[in-house]
Image: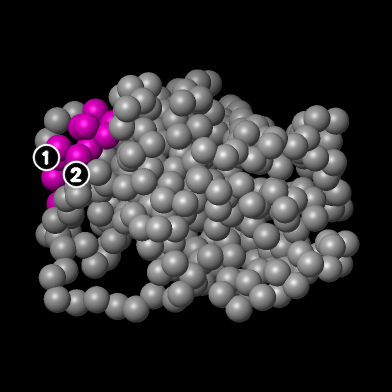
Amino acid sequence: MATAAAVSPSFSLNHHSSLVPKYHGVSLNSGIRVPTRVSSRGFNSRIRASSAVAVEPVIAKELRTPAQDATEAELFSCPICYEPLMRKGPPGFNLPAIYRSGFKCRKCNKSYSSKNIYLDLTITSGTKEYSESKPARTELFRSPVVSFLYERGWRQNFNLSGFPGPDEEFKMAQEYFKVAEGGVLVDVSCGSGLFSRKFAKSGTYSRVIALDFSENMLRQCYDFIKNDESILSSNLALVRADVSRLPFFSGSIDAVHAGAALHCWPSPSNAIAEINRILRSGGVFVGTTFLRVNPSAPTIFRALEQSAGRTYSYFTREEIEDLVTTCGLINYTSKVQNSFIMFSAQKP
């Protein structure tokens, strides 16, 4: 399989660079503020975006919210009413356990099951006659041919637009996610699981959810991991879901990653609003995408971007910041190289 050469890029930073920690000599994330809250006993404690709190005393049962109780019982929620799902099956959070289990909404009574490989938590899960058309950009990645080729040449071409390569992108994302270590990470629009597998193998997170709308991408992801026991037995789940209707209740997720995804979403504003909804206070969102025509890019690349723009939605760096902050996230920061941008923000 062809692989993209990892590049150690020199990024041009925007005016938020003071918020970011040092990475390869470039400030990336040092200014991200870990939220402080006041405990019921009147003293301040530093927390990270995780359900585990080391300093603050355990919250009394009568002070706990239904969402907190549900988080400990089951991670997934119904995509229709966002109520926690009841689970019947073997315990544990890994592929064999999840996909031998059945899930049912305690409120609307709808059942959800696995397709042997992934858990289908779309609204249309279980329909027999109904179907609906999706935008071309969505249907393209549901193709078995594109799913097969994604890590076998398709993704490697991203370096022509300034993407530094999966290994480098993973390291950069991990720097942003330091405040979410030990928490739950959702890799939305995960494709064939290129980064989901890296997050799971890192052992950094208590649970990793590889989430995509494409059935064939999820099948391809499973093909990559089925013979890797270190991933197969890790706390990883494959979930089919719509990024504009994420099957998690509000404030339950510590970290969300969206690699090369924003330009593919039918409604980026709905998707980022959903990401804001599911993040805990202090939780981190990290995304990468292609910028709309970069004036410094070679003429041939600009022509390709303009042509592809008929299918995808590309934005300027200013538009992305405006969208992310308007959807309620804070501490926005970004790094740019040619037409590549990695951006990050936090839930207040």
In the rendered structure, the answer to whether residue 282 lies left or right of residue 215 reads: right
Q: Residue at x 61, y 47 (%)?
A: 156
- Magenta-drawn stretch contains 94: yes
Q: In terms of secondary structure, where does tag 2 sit?
A: loop
| The one of 253 and 116 positioned closer to us in this rendering | 116
Task: Please tell me which of labels 2 and 1 falls first in the chain.
Answer: 1
Residue 1, label in figure: none
Q: Residues within 10 Å of mark 1 (few under 14, many from 20)?
A: few
- Is residue 201 in view from this perspective? yes
Going by the numbered disc 2, the residue's amino acid type is: Asn
- Start-end of magenta stretch: 92-104
Location of residue 290 in the rendering, given as x and y in whole percent from the top left corner = 68, 60
Question: Which structural element holds mark 1?
Answer: strand
The residue to which callout 2 is attached is: 116
166 lies above or below 216:
above
Kindly report the distance in space between the C-alpha atoms of the residues bearing marks 2 and 1.
15 Å
Q: Quadrant of residue 105?
A: bottom left
- The residue sitting at 55% across, 57% down in the picture is 261
Residue shown at 56%/75% (left/top)?
Answer: 311
Q: Nearer the viewer, residue 85 or 8?
A: 8
Q: Is residue 158 left or right of residue 38?
A: right
Residue 98 at what x, y percent from top left?
22, 37
Residue name at image x 39 percent, y 75 percent: 134
User: Is any part of residue 332 visible from this angle?
Assistant: no
Q: Which residue is label 1 attached to?
A: 88
Assess whether residue 160 is covered by the magenta stretch: no
- How packed mark 2 is, by other alpha carbons closer than 10 Å (few <14, some 14-19, many 20 or more), is few
- Horizontal and vertical percent position of residue 325: 67, 61
Residue type highlighted by circle 1: Lys
